[in-house]
Image (spheres, rainbow, N blue to C red):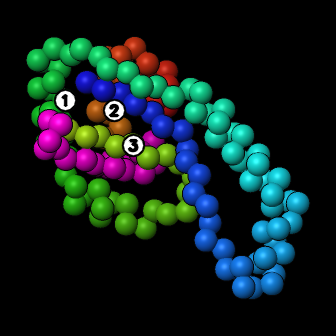
Amino acid sequence: MRIETIAMTYHEQNWNMEDENTRRYVESDGYINSQIQLRNRMEEFAKDNINMIIDIDKDFFENISKEIWNIDLLKIVQENNNSSGRDGYSVTIEYGSFQYFMSINVWNPGNTKGEVERINAIVLEVFRRANVDQWYN
């Protein structure tokens, strides 16, 4: 089983530089300094990333796979239809072989309720098995 964490990523904004006010803002010292600070923080977070492969036994694999197959994807969408604008993180579970797999990605699993909590519990159990559960809060 592979466990990997990825620090927050930076995406350049697509500013409309034709607009004079926008251009002045993007070129201002305040904005430039905030971007430098953001990139520095991201580099600090990246130092704590986890990238490991652990051996698991058949029973653990079967239990985790049963939990994954019992996730109701439609419920995740319904329960979190209007949740936006909150800070958080994303969790992705990829299950299957190297060629054929499914991927479930949820945003902010620690602050949502319902079906997403099942994903949170699965990931926490995997982190516990790898003795890195202190990294998953």
Rendering coords of residue 27 (x, y %): 82, 68
The answer to whether residue 19 is above or below residue 128 is below
Depth check, front residue: 5 or 107: 5
**Residues tagged 1 and 3 counted as in contact (Cβ below 8 A):** no
Q: Which is more N-terminal, label 2 or label 1?
A: 1
User: Which residue: 35% across, 16% down?
Assistant: 130
Confirm or deny contact between disc 3 and disc 2 (CB under 8 A). yes
Residue drawn at x 29%, y 17% is 54
Q: Where does the image place residue 118, in percent across and percent down from the top left?
A: 28, 40
Crowd rating for badge 1 (residues with CA inside 10 Å; few <14, some 14–19, many 20+): some
Q: Which of marks 3 and 2 is nearer the N terminus?
A: 3
Start and end of the magenta stretch? 96-118
Residue type at mark 1? Ile
Q: Is mark 2 on a helix, strand or loop?
A: helix
- Mark 1 or mark 3: name the one nearer the start of the chain: 1
Disc 2: which residue: 123
Depth check: 62 or 103 in front? 103
- 89 versus 21 height, above or below: above
Residue at label 3? 91
Q: How far apart are marks 3 and 2 (CA)?
A: 8 Å
User: Is 50 within the magenta?
Assistant: no
Residue 72 visible in the shown view: yes
Instruction: Identify which amino acid the numbered label 2 is placed on.
Output: Val
Number of marks in picture: 3
Residue under numbered circle 1 = 64
Mark 3: secondary structure: strand
Asked which quadrant contains residue 24, the reply is: bottom right
Crowd class of label 2 (few under 14; some 14 to 19; many from 20; radius 10 Å): some
